[in-house]
């Protein structure tokens, strides 16, 4: 009896879990993709809401022997157009890796970036 009870409890919990997933909003889905798309998070380089972030700083010595600081920065992509996003993901401009996401995943990221910037989340982190 006990076993039956715990099994049905488990099924119930699984069911709740599945339901929760299907009720995930487009913004939540976009946030999930933005923060962990196949392991290389956009947020690492573009900041929490796409506001941009310094990835690395280093010094370079030019031909004249002058030391100059170089900064590699993930661009500000708040409110980015889906076409621009699509091209950037496919080309991986230079520093950025390439990503193969579905149209739906790209739409969710575009939507998330708009919402996140509008809600002013970037100040919170
Ligand atoms: C390793 C750091 C890195 C990661 C991870 C990364 N990017 Fe980028 N991204 C960049 C850099 C740097 C640029 C500027 C162009 C360049 O030098 O590659 C850029 C450019 C872009 C652009 C073009 C901006 C413009 O105005 O043309 C978009 C859009 C973009 N990234 C979106 C994303 C999304 C969405 C993800 C996650 C799926 C992501 N990036 C992951 C570093 C990164």
Image (cartoon, rainbow, N blue to C red):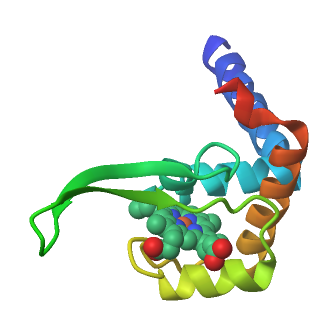
- Quadrant of the image containing the N terminus: top right
- Decide: is 123 above or below 27: above
- Decide: is 15 above or below 42: above
Looking at the rendering, the quadrant in which ligand 1 lies is bottom right
Residue drawn at the location 70% of the way across and 47% of the way down? 49
Q: Residue pushed farthest front?
A: 64
Task: Answer left or right for 40 relative to 22.
Answer: left
**Can you see residue 84?**
yes
- Whole-percent x and y of residue 114? 85, 56
User: For residue 123, what is the image quadrant?
Assistant: top right
Residue drawn at the location 83% of the way across and 36% of the way down? 120
- Whole-percent x and y of residue 109? 74, 63
- Whole-percent x and y of residue 14? 71, 36
- Whole-percent x and y of residue 57? 31, 50
User: For residue 113, what is the image quadrant?
Assistant: bottom right
In this view, the residue in front, 50 or 86, is: 50
Q: Residue pushed farthest top?
A: 2
Count numbered badges in the picture: 0
In this view, the residue in front, 18 or 82, is: 82
Task: Answer left or right for 5 relative to 70.
Answer: right
Residue drawn at the location 77% of the way across and 45% of the way down? 18
In this view, the residue in front, 102 or 22, is: 102
- Decide: is 30 above or below 28: below
**Can you see residue 22?**
no
Task: Answer left or right for 81 relative to 34.
Answer: right
- Quadrant of the image containing the C terminus: top right
In this view, the residue in front, 87 or 60, is: 60
């Amino acid at each position: 009896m006990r076993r039956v009870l715990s099994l049905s409890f488990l099924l119930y919990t699984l069911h709740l879990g599945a339901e929760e997933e299907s009720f995930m909003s487009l913004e939540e889905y976009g946030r999930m993709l933005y923060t962990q798309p196949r392991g290389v998070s956009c947020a690492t380089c573009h900041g929490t809401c796409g506001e941009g972030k310094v990835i690395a700083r280093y010094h370079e010595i030019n031909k004249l022997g002058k030391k100059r600081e170089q900064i590699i920065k993930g661009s500000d992509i708040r409110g980015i157009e889906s076409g621009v996003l699509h091209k950037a993901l496919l080309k991986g401009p230079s520093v950025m890796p390439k990503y193969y996401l579905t149209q739906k995943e790209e739409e969710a990221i575009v939507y998330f970036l708009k919402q996140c910037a509008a809600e002013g989340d970037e100040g919170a982190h």
